[in-house]
Image: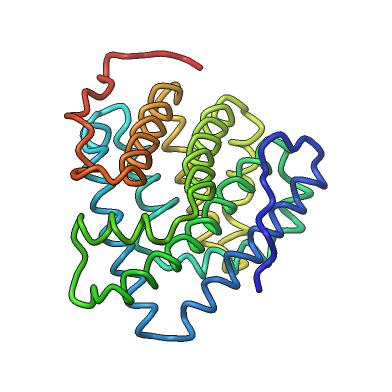
């Protein structure tokens, strides 16, 4: 059994953050290995993730089209959560983790820990939801009605709420890190050694996230809109609303908004 998840918010000690990161990484790796053991189950889980990614893209389509927020929205929907196998990235992180703990400041390490915890939580939730869909006979595709019924049947409301909270935690932390010149310098310094060591996937993930959030010039409005929408959909799903994903036409922030958080 994977180790229990350890919340990373409010952790300040670097060693405690590193321990939480290791726990979440071990959980994510174990859950992914379990999923790969059955090729049919793995394909069904990937189909579920593709459906969820398409739903997220519809819900947040205004952010994906907005000049200011498009890059960060794409990072969230592909690099943080998307229909990909993140096994290679996780394996690379597992290899280099002691060096990252020594190199990164606590704030950057905590951001990485939250991202990895979100990955582990998503793996657990997707596995449970995929199993319910199979038992319900959804072999040939997923629609909104089947998804909503399976979502409620799978339960795990507290973990679902934690998943959304982690979206806010990762987004807010990334926004703050972009204002720290030290982090940008460390990422540049890591680039060549990472490529030589075969750590390209991990390095690309770190650089993509940093660049996407730096380009926004303030992440507060972007993060709050994603979190508020996902919380509203969660409530509607558990309440059994007939059209849970219809939360109104997203107004979305405009490129002219320039808040700083």
Q: Quadrant of residue 246?
A: top left
- In terms of depth relative to the viewer, which is nearer, 248 or 28? 248
**Residue under the image location 33 percent in, 61 percent down:** 150
**Percent position (x, y) of residue 174?**
53, 34
Is residue 150 depicted above or below 16 in this figure?
below
Q: Quadrant of residue 94?
A: bottom right
Which residue is drawn at the image coordinates 49% and 63% (left, top)? Answer: 123
| Image location (x, y in percent) of residue 188 | 58, 44
Of residues 257 and 142, the one nearer the viewer is 142
Q: Coloring scheme of the render?
A: rainbow
Q: Residue at x 23, y 33 (%)?
A: 247
Of all residues, the one furthest to the front in this rendering is 239
Above/below status of 87 relative to 201: below
**Residue 144 spot, x, y in % from top left:** 20, 55
Residue 191 shown left or right of residue 255 in the figure: right
- On screen, 253 above or below 227? above
- Residue 15, above or below 83: above
Residue shown at the point (24%, 29%) measured from the top left: 66
The answer to whether residue 42 is left or right of residue 123 is left
Residue 245 location (% of width, % of height): 23, 42
Q: Quadrant of the N terminus?
A: bottom right
């Amino acid at each position: 059994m994977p180790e229990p998840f350890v919340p990373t918010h409010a952790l300040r000690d670097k060693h405690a953050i590193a321990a939480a990161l290791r726990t979440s990484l071990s959980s994510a790796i174990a859950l992914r290995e379990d999923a790969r053991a059955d090729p049919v189950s793995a394909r069904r889980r990937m189909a579920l993730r593709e459906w969820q990614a398409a739903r997220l893209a519809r819900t947040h389509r205004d952010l994906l089209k907005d000049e200011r927020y498009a890059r960060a929205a794409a990072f969230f929907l592909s690099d943080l959560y998307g229909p990909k196998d993140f096994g290679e990235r996780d394996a690379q992180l597992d290899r280099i983790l002691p060096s990252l703990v020594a190199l990164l400041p606590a704030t950057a390490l905590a951001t990485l820990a939250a991202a990895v915890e979100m990955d582990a939580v998503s793996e657990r939730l997707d596995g449970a939801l995929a199993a319910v869909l199979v038992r319900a006979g959804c072999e040939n595709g997923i629609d909104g009605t089947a998804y909503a019924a399976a979502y409620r049947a799978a339960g795990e409301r507290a973990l679902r709420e934690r998943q959304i909270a982690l979206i806010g935690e990762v987004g807010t932390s990334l926004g703050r890190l972009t204002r720290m010149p030290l982090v940008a310098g460390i990422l540049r310094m890591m680039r060549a050694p990472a490529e030589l060591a075969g750590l390209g996937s991990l390095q690309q993930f770190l650089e993509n996230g940093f660049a996407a959030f730096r380009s926004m010039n303030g992440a507060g409005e972007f993060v709050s809109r994603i979190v508020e929408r996902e919380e509203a959909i969660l409530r509607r799903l558990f309440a059994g609303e007939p059209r849970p994903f219809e939360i109104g036409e997203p107004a979305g922030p405009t490129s002219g908004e320039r808040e700083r958080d």
